[in-house]
Image (tube, helix red, strand yellow):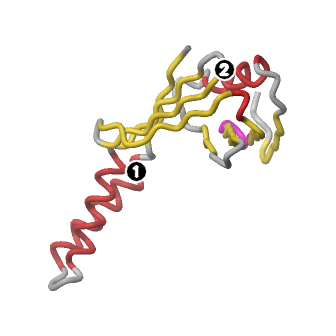
Amino acid sequence: MKTFIAEEPKILWTILFFMAMTYAYALEGNIQYFAYAAMAVSFLALTTRYHLTVEEDRLVMIIKVAGVKVRTKQLQAMEITNVHQIIAGSKVIFIVTGKSGQQMKIHRFKPHSFEQEVSEFVDRNELQIKQTVTKERKQ
């Protein structure tokens, strides 16, 4: 059982935060509150972390915002109906779908051994994997 961590991309949320701060200072009236709301959303996005745990027979993803657990997604191996792997150059995305329609989009996790760990999970539990290659990987 190994845990992997991913975060939201920092640069875009940081740009949004500073743009919203500028607008909050420059605007007047009720419209100014939209800029404050955008600042709050960007701050929360900057503090969002995803924890993926690959266990013997289940995948668990915990979403934390500002260090507080806000959601837990779990998929048992026997509940999984579809595993789709998308390879786009150096990036790999897994989309795992359960019987109830619940989906887990697994990407951007560190260390990069999460790809191998998820592939081993799929093999170990004899699940079918559909693979799409949009851009070949560099060797």
Q: Position of residue 74 (x, y in %)?
A: 56, 33
- Is 125 included in the stretch rendered in magenta? no
Q: Which residue is located at x 46 percent, y 30 percent?
A: 51
In this view, the residue in front, 98 or 117, is 98
Which image quadrant is residue 49 in? top left
Residue 83 placement: quadrant: top right
Q: Main secondary structure of the magenta part?
A: strand
* Left or right: where 110 falls relative to 45: right
Q: Quadrant of the N terminus?
A: top right
Query: Label 1 crowding class (10 Å Cα cut-off): few <14, some 14-19, many 20+?
Result: few
* Cα distance between the residues tagged 1 and 2: 36 Å
Is 124 placed left or right of 28 in the picture? right
Range of magenta residues: 87-91
Tell which of 95 and 6 is nearer to you: 95
Residue drawn at point x = 44 percent, y = 45 percent: 8
Which amino acid is tagged 2?
Asp
Asked if residue 127 is positioned above or below residue 25 in the image, the reply reads: above
Q: Residue 117: where, in percent of width, then height?
A: 65, 20
Q: Is residue 116 above or below residue 22?
A: above
Residue 109 placement, left or right of 75: left
Q: Secondary structure at mark 1?
A: helix
Q: Position of residue 37 (x, y in %)?
A: 27, 67
- Amino acid type for the residue under numbered disc 1: Ile
* Residue name at image x 51 percent, y 25 percent: 4
Q: Which element is circle 2 on?
A: loop
Identify residue for label 1: 11
Q: What residue would you read off at disc 2?
A: 57
Badge 2 crowding class, 10 Å Cα cut-off, few under 14, some 14 to 19, many 20 or more, is: few
